[in-house]
Structure formats: C-alpha cells, structure tokens
Amino acid sequence: MSDDVKRLLGRADHDIGCDACFDELDRYVELELGGGNADAAVPGMRAHLESCAVCRDEHDSLVALASAD
Amino acid sequence: MLLEPPPTVASVPTVPAETPLRELDPASRTWLADLRAGGARRDSAVVRLHALLLKAARFEIARRRPAYPHLRGNDLDDLAQQSADDALVAVLARLDEFRGLSRFTTWAYKFALYEAGAKVRKRAWQGREIPLDDPAWERFATAGSPQAGAERSELLAALGEALDALTQHQRRVFTALALNEVPIDVLAERLETTRGALYKTLHDARARLRGELADRGFDIEGSSE
C-alpha cells in the first residue's frame, strides 16, 4: 500500500490525540533533542504526529526553535 | 479585520506561585521568578516574554507562508503580533502548569506556534468553501506500473464504498481532513467544535475504514487493528 493511502487510513497504534500532544510537546521535543527515548516517555505521540499534519507542523517548528536556543 | 489591542502589562493575568522553583534549570527558574515578581521586574520580564513569543510566531508564519502565497506581508506581520499577544496571555494564565519538564522557553514557544499556525491557516482559508462532501480523489491519481495502478484503483474504489459505513459526521470530517487536506483547526472553527473533538472523530472514522477494507480482503499493513 502506498504511503499516501496509508496516511489516509492512519495508524492503529495508541494515539494520544491533539490535546495531549500539545500538553506533552515541549517535553517530547527536548527528549528528542537530548537523545532521550522520547517515544517511550510519551507513548502515542509518534503515532499522533504521523497522523495529524497540524500537530506535526508544530512539532517540527518547535524542534527547530528549541534546537537553536 | 479589527485587531485586538495588545495586552498591556497591567492587563495580563496574575500568576500563582506554586511551581517549586528549585527543581527547574537556572534559566527557567529566573523566568518564573521574574514573572511572579512585582513592579518593574515583572514588567520587564513580560516585555522579554512577548519578544520571545513574537520571534516564535514570526518563525512559524515564515515557515507556513510558502503554502499560502496569496497572503500579503503586512497581513502576516499583523498575524504574528496578534499571535504573540494571544500567546502571552495564554502563557501567563497557564504559568502554574509549567512542570519544568522542558526549558521554560521551549514550553512558551509552543503557545506562539499554536497561535501563529492557527491564525495563518484560518486567514488563508478565509472566505473559502470547506469541501465536506466532495472527496478530491484526483489527488490520488494512479501512478506506477499498470498492475500497481489497477491495485491502487481497486483499493481507492473500495475506500470510496467504505465511506458509506461511516456516520454522516464521520464521513464529512474524513472527507475534509484526510481526503481534501483541510487544516483541522480551520474545520474546527467552521464546525464550531474543537480540534481535539474533530481528531477523535477522524480517528474513529479511520479505524472503521481500516476494518471495512480488511473485511474486503485488503492487506492494511501497518494500519490494521
């Protein structure tokens, strides 16, 4: 199955949703930047970021901003 | 669009002093202490915080701008200012929720990114009809070998039929968000709901569609429940 169709159908993994994503985003990003196991610390975040374009944009921007500080 | 006046130092919410400062990194501890102080020390910190949020808002709007070439530069800087103003109010109102699990600046940035991203998307979609009922199947035009193209066409045809298994609300949300790529915050505003509630509907719709396709014999690798 092609990636665009997979993206249409989303993932069956645990997905924390937009509200919890926002709450945990800063911690998750700093764990990523610090080499920690962000996905283990915030289960469901990776699945959400792969399924929600707006949250993925916010994540990518926060990585860029936080890594420049 | 009328612009809201920027929040003044005197109008921003007062901050409860409950987060244990000694658990924070030094820079974050200083931010919190300054923002919880009184008088000129707090005023100065609020001005610095607004500048930080404005930097993040401008950064986010610059990143999103290529997707919306019809927006004008002056509009975008107004949006950045509004975003920083709104983010400042949000950060100060929720300061006691900062748990010190990231740097204070990283925590604060996300409010500005949220506001700026939402504002630029809403401005870009202002006056545009939201496609709730007409899936843009042409976006998924067949490519590759004839065999792959035939399999893809068969899958997409089955997906189109599977939409009938959804409730009307699920079908419209899936059509807008997944098939037509309407930003979720834009749709939330039009439907007078929240981003979280819409995402839940989308999540449920996707699960139903994966089940329908699996029942029809499709291998939903990596996305079946």
Image (spheres, grey):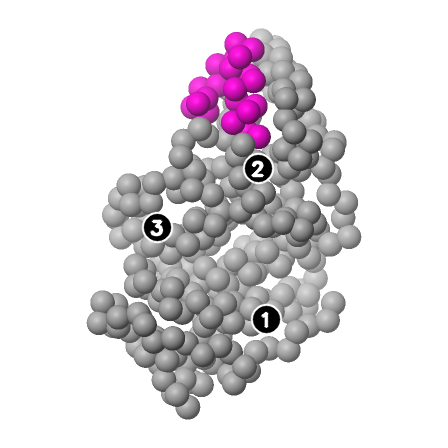
| Dots 3 and 1 on the same chain | no
Cα–Cα span, label 3 and label 1: 27 Å
Q: Is residue B19 left or right of residue B129?
A: left
User: Start and end of the magenta stretch?
Assistant: B205-225
Q: Is residue B19 left or right of residue A18?
A: left
Cα–Cα span, label 1 and label 2: 33 Å
- Residue under circle 3? A28
Q: How many C-alpha atoms fall within 10 Å of the one at disc 2: few (<14), some, or many (≥20)?
A: some
Q: Nearer the viewer, residue B38 or B80?
A: B38
Instruction: Give the residue drawn at x 42%, y 42%.
Output: A16
* The magenta stretch spans residue B216: yes
Q: In this rendering, which labeled residue sits more in front, label 3 or label 2?
A: 2
Q: In this rendering, which labeled residue sits more in front, label 3 or label 1?
A: 3
One can see residue B180 in this view: no
- Residue under circle 1? B81
Image quadrant occupied by the N terminus of chain B: bottom right
Helix, strand or loop at disc 2?
helix
Displayed quadrant of residue B142: top right
Compared with residue B101, is residue A56 higher up or lower down, i.e. above or below?
Answer: above
Mark 1 touches mark 2? (CB < 8 Å): no
| Dots 1 and 2 on the same chain | yes
